[in-house]
Image (cartoon, rainbow, N blue to C red):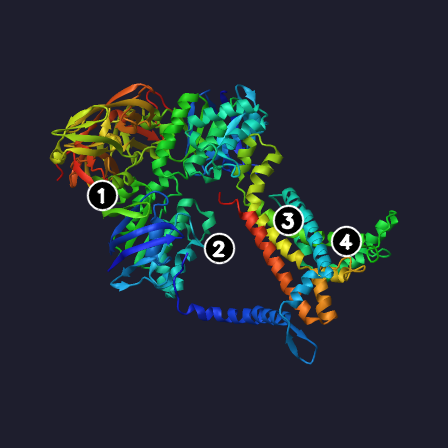
């Protein structure tokens, strides 16, 4: 069983919301749509659910073309960013509602609602109305309602975005456990790269209505196929600099030079873009290939356990994220090190060219 | 510019509060120094927004006083207190241009148009809105609108304090970084007192010089980010700050030594624990200060999650879960392993509160 | 947004379609039919072309009633819109008085239209009506059945009493949807109540006021029952508004052709003006 999008597109008026997209999600998989607001995450989900019809292309499910099939006939459940529950029903009735629609026997309803409530720690609140619950509990109720029927496709559209930081952490921990032994396809939309990493599974990076890359989450994080994918999948934003390969070394416009190592050593001469994640830029020289980088300090943020230094380097803002407290005077010149063995090189068209280390 | 003092402040939304539970804010005595960057940090419903509204004058406290530079302003309206506020959802005057939005507070106060122009341009340059000054404010993106809200506070010279009520809620993660560091940069430039309310520890810790941690209407700890991270004075602070939060583990203390799951653990303040005191004893150690070791506390690895920079390793010691952070790329053993807790960062809490070294609480 | 196709969906629309056809399209076609023919009774019809249209458009009688109609609609809009917003602004936003105010406001809207006419007729009678009697006892010579100015005064007062509530309720709903943060920000920016109204409340009310304006325009332009009961179009023809005139021609004189042509012209005027107002009022919205 699998969900397949074959060349689907979506337009509203003249605005393209989704460029031709092909994606396949397997049963039992946890899939993340990662991208900023308006990247097309919600539209893509609506196409999957059958809430919207694609302009072109087809949606296939379990070997059948379901492109025109309305959402009521598909076995789909959905959780939204807003906490959506029936306000005048108790938590129990809220969770039971999909089963009631399906005319399940009372015994089954009771049993499954109680199991769900137990899993989501809602048992003490079953008799209460959603309005009397905290945000976290309301969203748990919505999640329980989505999971109580055995949906083939579960769509979660930024379900944790409206929750407090700590509650987010808690639910992030619980969610993968809930899906662990279910036979369904989970699709989870988020704007936060860290969230994608913690869930694992597969990730599709979205940018302005196009999927830039799809594959196992960690692989996409470590081996992005393009600068766009790397930028979408980086929090804080990945540092970039234009450089040129000349023989056995690279040079940038400011005259900095460093030896080409790893697979980058095999690149032909010409212009490239180097990208490196902020935590590989540190005050101390660390890693396999530390290269000095410096710039004028714009602002430093000290969070108690780590230092985040924003500095201007060659017309770009760079960010360094490191352990410990490293105070820098604003406006002063900071001399830091970047571990270029972790650098990624991209060709002028944005596609991945090489890495600063020999990748396994 | 002013020093803000909250004197014996309390607030209840119900007319005749009977017990402490009726108070949304319990007993508060806090001072905000002139020119400081402060954060009020706590979960939803901890009273931080109530406190913010009391300082700005949008809400009158049921008890106590608010002083600006020693002067009682409790009865004054927001515009008489000379404060500025940036709200959770951007507030801009839709029909006006960006320029008119920034000029609005000055024009309302009858400032001469030449001075208005000078000030508006100065501030627009500071918040990177020079290019869009003539655009309609309603057409801007969320981060642009938040900058306008902030700008309306910055144009006024008489502002005592600028307050932020979860200003990054509607901003995308990528832009959050930019706007957040922009706020920090602006604070360092203009040196106005700023108070930033949030439930997000990262925002609070990176923005503020001092963080006021609140829980159920009470201030739990006031300190620099380093103090909150390294020596949380209450289990709540340990749990709430840090991601994942501090490991909080049941323990025993015998003869000045701490025991966790029957194994001896060195703790910085174990010697200060008085046997005569009552209340449950717990050990607090942050995941950052737990490491894998060849020998030490016996543990079993349960789960490893990859957050990119770190691997969050969940282990089990006896029946207690212990989390630790391990750098990217380090091999994690499966099954049995040993842990070591950094002694000077391992502390004992009684009844939730840190046992003070050398004295009983 | 193009929704999913559902092949059975048109079946559900069929009853409504039939009803609309029966209610609107068939009578409208009948009117069009009458408007281009001449009849001398006996169910005999002769092609008349645009003769009736020319006659109506050139008739002074039509010009006069159209003029009266325009004055009436302009007056009540000029009074009801600002008054409605003003009342909505003074209504409490919270507390037990909210529902009391809302019910009081809704009352005039719940009274059948002919009853409104009859009520005001009695109310304004110079000898026994409370309003008429009071005015006369104050030394003002008031008689709405004899003096055109008095008839107009009563007519407009009645409409304002009857329909301002609609504007109030719409404006109140619009005001209630403005988040508190806007008021708080304005207070902090030192804005006075005029500035708050001008830069926050009015812009945020724009959409509902557009709807209120269009509703009041269309309703008042088509008004029939209340003036018919109150003044019957008199004294003389002084309060004969378009619809009253139309009925006089159609039923009173049984001139089917001119009446049909006038109906269509009337209909087109309303359609055109509504479109113009709507376009003008929503023009600046998406800039």
Compute the Cα span from label 4 to label 1: 78 Å
Both labels 1 and 3 in a single chain: no
For the C terminus of chain A, the image quarter is: top left
Graded by Cα atoms within 10 Å as few (under 14), some (14 to 19) or many (20 or more), the crowding at tag 2 reads few
Describe residue B203's horizontal placement relative to residue B155 as left or right.
Answer: left
Is residue A202 shown above or below B109? below
Compute the Cα span from label 1 to label 3: 58 Å
Mark 4 belongs to which subunit?
Answer: C
Residues at discs 1 and 3 in contact (Cβ within 8 Å): no
Residues at discs 4 and 1 in contact (Cβ within 8 Å): no
Identify the disc placed on residue B56: none
Identify the disc placed on residue C168: 3
Both labels 4 and 3 in a single chain: yes
The residue carrying mark 2 is A88
Identify the disc placed on residue C152: 4
The residue carrying mark 1 is A220
Both labels 3 and 2 in a single chain: no
Counting every numbered tag in the picture gives: 4
Residues at discs 2 and 4 in contact (Cβ within 8 Å): no
């Amino acid at each position: 069983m699998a969900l397949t999008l074959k060349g689907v597109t979506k337009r509203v008026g003249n605005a393209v919301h989704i460029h031709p997209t092909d994606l396949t999600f397997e049963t039992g998989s946890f899939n993340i749509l990662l991208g900023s607001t308006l990247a097309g995450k919600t539209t893509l989900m609506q196409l999957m659910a059958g809430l919207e019809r694609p302009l072109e292309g087809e949606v296939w499910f379990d070997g059948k073309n379901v492109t025109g099939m309305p959402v009521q006939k598909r076995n789909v459940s959905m959780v939204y960013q807003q906490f959506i529950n029936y306000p005048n029903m108790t938590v129990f009735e809220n969770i039971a509602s999909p089963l009631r629609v399906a005319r399940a026997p009372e015994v089954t309803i009771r049993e499954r609602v109680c199991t769900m409530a137990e899993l989501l720690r809602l048992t003490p609140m079953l008799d209460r109305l959603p309005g009397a619950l905290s945000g976290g509990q309301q969203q748990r109720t919505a999640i329980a309602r989505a999971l109580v029927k055995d949906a083939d496709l579960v769509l979660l559209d930024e379900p944790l975005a409206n929750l407090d930081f700590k509650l987010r952490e808690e639910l992030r921990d619980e969610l993968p456990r809930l899906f662990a032994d279910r036979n369904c396809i989970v699709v989870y939309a988020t704007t936060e790269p860290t969230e994608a990493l913690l869930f694992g599974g597969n990730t599709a990076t979205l940018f302005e209505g196009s999927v830039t890359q799809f594959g196992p989450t960690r692989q996409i994080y470590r081996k992005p196929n393009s600068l766009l994918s790397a930028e979408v999948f980086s929090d804080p934003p990945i540092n970039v600099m234009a450089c040129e390969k000349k023989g056995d070394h690279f040079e940038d416009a400011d005259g900095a030079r460093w030896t080409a190592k790893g697979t980058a050593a095999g690149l032909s001469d010409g212009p490239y873009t180097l990208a490196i994640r902020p935590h590989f830029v540190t005050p101390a020289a660390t890693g396999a290939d530390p290269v000095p980088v410096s710039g004028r300090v714009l602002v430093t943020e000290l969070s108690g356990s780590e230092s985040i230094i924003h500095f201007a380097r060659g017309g770009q803002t760079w960010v360094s994220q490191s352990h410990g407290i490293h105070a820098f005077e604003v406006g002063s010149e900071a001399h830091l090190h970047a571990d270029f063995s972790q650098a990624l090189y991209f060709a002028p068209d944005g596609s991945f060219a090489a890495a600063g280390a020999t990748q396994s | 510019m002013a020093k803000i003092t909250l004197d014996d402040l309390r607030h209840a939304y119900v007319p005749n509060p009977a017990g402490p539970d009726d108070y949304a804010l319990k007993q508060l005595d806090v001072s905000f120094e002139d020119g400081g960057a402060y954060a009020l940090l706590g979960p939803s419903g901890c009273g931080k927004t109530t406190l913010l509204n009391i300082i700005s004058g949008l809400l009158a406290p049921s008890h106590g006083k608010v002083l600006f530079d020693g002067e009682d302003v409790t009865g004054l309206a927001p515009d008489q207190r000379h404060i500025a506020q940036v709200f959770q959802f951007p507030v801009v005057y839709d029909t006006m241009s960006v320029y008119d939005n920034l000029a609005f507070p000055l024009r309302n106060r009858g400032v001469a148009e030449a001075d208005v122009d000078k000030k508006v341009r100065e501030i627009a340059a500071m918040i990177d809105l020079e290019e869009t000054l003539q655009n309609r404010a309603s057409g801007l993106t969320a981060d642009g609108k938040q900058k306008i809200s902030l700008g309306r506070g910055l144009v006024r010279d008489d502002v005592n304090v600028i307050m932020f009520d979860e200003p990054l809620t509607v901003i995308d993660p990528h832009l959050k970084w930019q706007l957040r560091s922009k706020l920090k940069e602006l604070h360092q430039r203009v040196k106005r007192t700023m108070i930033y309310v949030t439930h997000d520890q990262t925002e609070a810790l990176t923005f503020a010089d001092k963080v006021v941690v609140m829980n159920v209407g009470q201030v739990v700890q006031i300190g620099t980010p380093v103090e909150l991270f390294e020596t949380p004075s209450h289990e709540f602070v340990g749990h709430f700050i840090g991601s994942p939060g501090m490991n909080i583990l049941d323990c025993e203390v015998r003869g000045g030594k701490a025991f966790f799951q029957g194994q001896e653990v060195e703790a910085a303040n174990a010697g200060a624990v008085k046997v005569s005191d009552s209340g449950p004893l717990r050990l607090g150690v942050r995941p950052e200060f737990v490491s894998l070791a060849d020998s030490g506390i016996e543990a079993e690895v349960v789960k490893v999650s990859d957050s990119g920079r770190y691997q969050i390793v969940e282990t089990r010691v006896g029946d207690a879960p212990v989390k630790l952070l391990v750098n990217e790329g380090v091999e994690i053993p499966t099954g049995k392993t040993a842990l070591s807790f950094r002694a000077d960062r391992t502390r004992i809490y009684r009844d939730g509160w840190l046992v003070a070294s050398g004295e009983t609480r | 947004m193009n929704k999913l196709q559902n092949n059975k969906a048109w079946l559900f629309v069929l009853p409504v379609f039939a009803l609309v056809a029966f209610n609107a399209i068939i009578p409208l076609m009948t009117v069009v039919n009458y408007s281009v023919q001449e009849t001398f009774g006996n169910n005999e019809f002769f092609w008349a072309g645009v003769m009736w249209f020319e006659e109506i458009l050139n008739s002074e009688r039509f010009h006069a009633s159209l003029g009266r109609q325009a004055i009436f609609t302009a007056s009540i809009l000029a009074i009801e819109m600002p008054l409605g917003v003003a009342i909505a602004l003074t209504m409490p936003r919270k507390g037990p008085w909210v529902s009391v105010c809302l019910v009081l406001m809704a009352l005039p809207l719940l009274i059948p239209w002919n009853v409104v006419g009859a009520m005001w007729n009695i109310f304004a009678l110079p000898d026994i009506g409370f309003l008429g009697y009071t005015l006369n006892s104050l030394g003002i010579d008031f008689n709405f059945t004899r003096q055109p100015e008095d008839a107009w005064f009563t007519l407009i007062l009645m409409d304002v009493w009857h329909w301002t509530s609609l504007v109030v309720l719409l404006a109140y709903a619009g005001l209630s949807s403005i988040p508190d943060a806007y008021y708080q920000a304005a207070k902090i920016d030192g804005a006075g109540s005029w500035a708050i109204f001008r830069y926050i409340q009015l812009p945020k009310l724009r959409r509902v006021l557009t709807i209120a304006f269009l509703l009041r325009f269309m309703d008042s332009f088509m008004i029939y029952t209340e003036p018919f009961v109150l003044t019957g179009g008199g004294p003389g023809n002084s309060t004969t508004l378009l619809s009253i005139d139309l009925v006089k021609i159609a039923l009173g004189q049984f001139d089917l052709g001119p009446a049909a042509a006038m109906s269509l012209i009337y209909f087109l005027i309303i359609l055109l003006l509504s479109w113009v107002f709507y376009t003008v009022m929503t023009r600046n919205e998406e800039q």
